[in-house]
Amino acid sequence: LGIVPRFIHDLFQRLEKKKQTEPIDYQVLVSFLELYNEDLVDLLNPSKSKKCDVQIREDVNGNIYWAGVREEVCQTPEDLVKNLIKGSLGRTTGSTDMNSVSSRSHAIFSVILKQKPLQEQNEEQVIVSKFHFVDLAGSERLKRTNAQGDRAREGISINSGLLALGNVISALGDESRKSSHVPYRDSKLTRLLQDSLGGNSQTLMMACVSPSDTNFPETLSTLKYANRARNIKNKVVINQEFVGSSVQVNQLRSQVARLTMELQALK
């Protein structure tokens, strides 16, 4: 099993175990997005064309969300795995001199968990967690892949997104970033990952390298890329929503949580 299937089974096991000691209700939702040539593709909505109406938006509290994406409710681990397979089969691939089934896009498999304590109160508290599993297409050297036509354009788009991501990582890893601009808007990739990189999150980056000495330049570049990511440090707080409260009260609570996180980051 890979990382995502292991996570899926562990998630449901932990939720069922938690229900034995705490009276909670929970809901699990999933979405699957592909970023291909700067176009967003909803991999769980095959009825739509390659270009879909998904929009990257930001709420009043600075949280990033995706409007128009299809979210499937999953009752069991098998439901999540089915959506993972369904979306993976719809991803864009192509052949190059270095890989016959090369990924030509970036993909984000997102699992949203909502937990609600079962208690008799006028105000219901909902804890919201998001898990983003991001598969980045590998950086490409056109001379080595011998890509032409569509493959070359795809490679340029991939490298452009990775370059923008590298710039964001460098800005976030800089100790003086609190007073500097972080270029999230330079690419849809960095905009999609804004919360995961510099938001209220814990992030793990895995760098894939080749053991072959012929790939030494790519391996060195990847390791330097990952080393920059190590410098990013985030302070996280619990995401809570309140059902039954006024909109103004909800916004104030969210603002307090955001300011608390910023104060912790300054320590």
Image (cartoon, grey):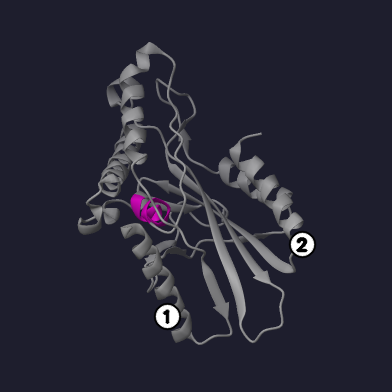
Q: Is residue 11 left or right of residue 223?
A: right
Query: Which structural element holds mark 1?
Result: helix
Q: Which is more foreground, mark 2 or mark 1?
A: 2
Q: Is residue 11 left or right of residue 172?
A: right
Residue at (43%, 54%) from the top-left corner? 51
Q: Residues within 10 Å of mark 2 (few under 14, many from 20)?
A: few
Query: Which structural element holds mark 2?
Result: loop
Using the rendered image of the protein, determine whether residue 149 is visible from the camera's viewpoint: no
**Residue under pointer 2:** 21
Amino acid bearing label 2: Thr
Q: Of all residues shown, which one is farthest toward the front?
A: 267
Q: Position of residue 136 (x, y in %)?
A: 43, 39
Residue at (46%, 47%) from the top-left corner? 203
- Placement of the C terminus among the 4 image quadrants: bottom left
Instruction: Give the extent of the magenta segment.
Output: 190-198
**Residue under pointer 1:** 252
